[in-house]
Amino acid sequence: MNKVPEVNFIYRIDGKYVSKNTDDIFANKKIVIFALPGAFTPTCSDYHLPSYEERYDEIIKYGVDGIFCLSMNDPFVQNVWKKNFNIKKVNFIPDGNGDFTKGMNMLTDRSEAGMGMRSFRYSMYVVNKEIVKIFKDENGKFDVSDAGTMINFLKSLNA
């Protein structure tokens, strides 16, 4: 796979459902996206999301147009998660139906933890819908999809 999948995402903005597609997010832009199993889960909330929020400005200085957090949660859950954790810089992508995750072939069965089908934890750098680099963690781990690994990769592009 060289391109991100063509899908629609359903957001909830100002009390209305708003549909955004792959082009709205990725076309003609340099995007860092990180995906995680779920909002409010310990590693996602304590480490993954905060690492990108805290290092947002450092990532953007490498010419990145935006940073997005994708989880297989509905827009209601994501909006509350963003508010509860006071996220101001990172944008969210609700993939409640898992369309993007399926298209990326990143589904993992977390039924043993009572979570059902979820996304693997990964991060990627995308330029105009083309996937330049993916960092995929082993199931249950958090060791290569963090902000630091992405920053080191972006530095290597500019070296």
Image (cartoon, rainbow, N blue to C red):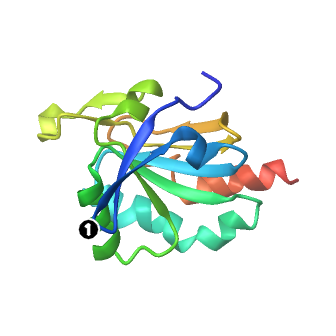
| Position in image of residue 134 (x %, y %) | 59, 37
Quadrant position of the N terminus in the picture: top right
| Position in image of residue 32 (x %, y %) | 60, 51
**What's the amino acid at mark 1?**
Val
| Position in image of residue 59 (x %, y %) | 67, 63
Left or right of residue 60: residue 109? left
Of all residues shown, which one is farthest toward the right? 159
Give the number of callouts. Answer: 1
- Comparing 43 with 132, the one in front is 132
- For mark 1, what is the residue? 80
Q: Quadrant of residue 148?
A: bottom right
Q: Residue at horizontal 17%, vertical 40%? A: 115
- Comparing 42 with 74, the one in front is 74
- Comparing 54 with 17, the one in front is 17
Residue 105 seen in this snapshot: no
Q: Residue at horizontal 67%, vertical 58%? A: 151
Q: Quadrant of residue 40?
A: bottom left
Q: Is residue 119 above or below residue 158?
A: above
